Amino acid sequence: MGTIIPILPCQSIREQVAFYESIGFETVQVYTRPYPYAVVRLKELELHFYGSKKTIPSENPQMCYLKVDDVDKLYEKFTVDLKKNLGKIPRSGIPRISKLKDLADDRRFIITDLGGNTLIVGTPNSQLSDGATFFRTLESKEYAKNFEILYDLIYSKEDGDVANRMLVKFFPLDLTSMDIGEIDLAKILSTLPRRLLPQRRREEMNRIFVSIFKIKRKLKDKVMSI
């Protein structure tokens, strides 16, 4: 069976290659004449780029999906390398990297390179072993379906304005008026940008999630000991 390799644009082939080298890729080939072209590789991942002065990174619509065996490990590597080279983990602007998110089909993150290309990096839920759909599901039957739609819209588009509009559409203005458990409430609150959450709500949400992680860790340790 053959292999499909994306060929993506960038303004500067040398700067593009330097960016990918900074997050662990090795440069296989670089050409500047007669046409700028480069090949980078990270284990089984291979990307090709061509240079074009017409490329506007902020308006670049090009994207591709990279299916990997361990999205958590790759995400950790990219964020550590980005922080080391840029002094921070860039969440906005170009380049940037999203947070890890659990969607209906996979766990993923999105990285936008210097050329404005969007790389969606994910591992199918069927290959994960820790209940990847936990954060996108509610126990409440009344709100579960709408929450899954809200969650997937937010984390596939990463748009805070969309999150606010959908939240108002799907849920009461006063979230505490809903007849739901505190874990469900914390999940709903987590879809809001932190700047829109009152300090008291942020502290409450953090407290609930810390408790959840402790419980999940105990269950995982118990299973491993069997």
Image (cartoon, helix red, strand yellow):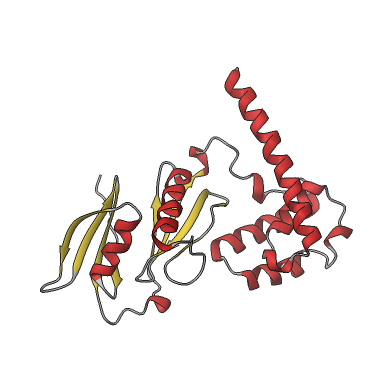
Instruction: Tell me, yes or no, if residue 7 can be seen here.
Output: no
For the point 34% across and 71% down, the residue is 115
Q: Residue furthest top?
A: 226
Does 215 sit above or below residue 207? Answer: above
Q: Residue furthest left?
A: 34
> How many marks do you count on the picture?
0
x, y percentage for residue 194?
Answer: 68, 63
Does 194 sit above or below residue 44? Answer: below
Quarter of the image containing the N terminus?
top left
Q: Nearer the viewer, residue 73 or 188?
A: 73
x, y percentage for residue 209?
Answer: 71, 46
The quadrant in which residue 52 appears is: bottom left
Left or right of residue 136: residue 141 = right
Instruction: Tell me, yes or no, if residue 16 can be seen here.
Output: yes
x, y percentage for residue 16?
Answer: 29, 66
x, y percentage for residue 10?
Answer: 30, 72
Q: Residue furthest bottom?
A: 54
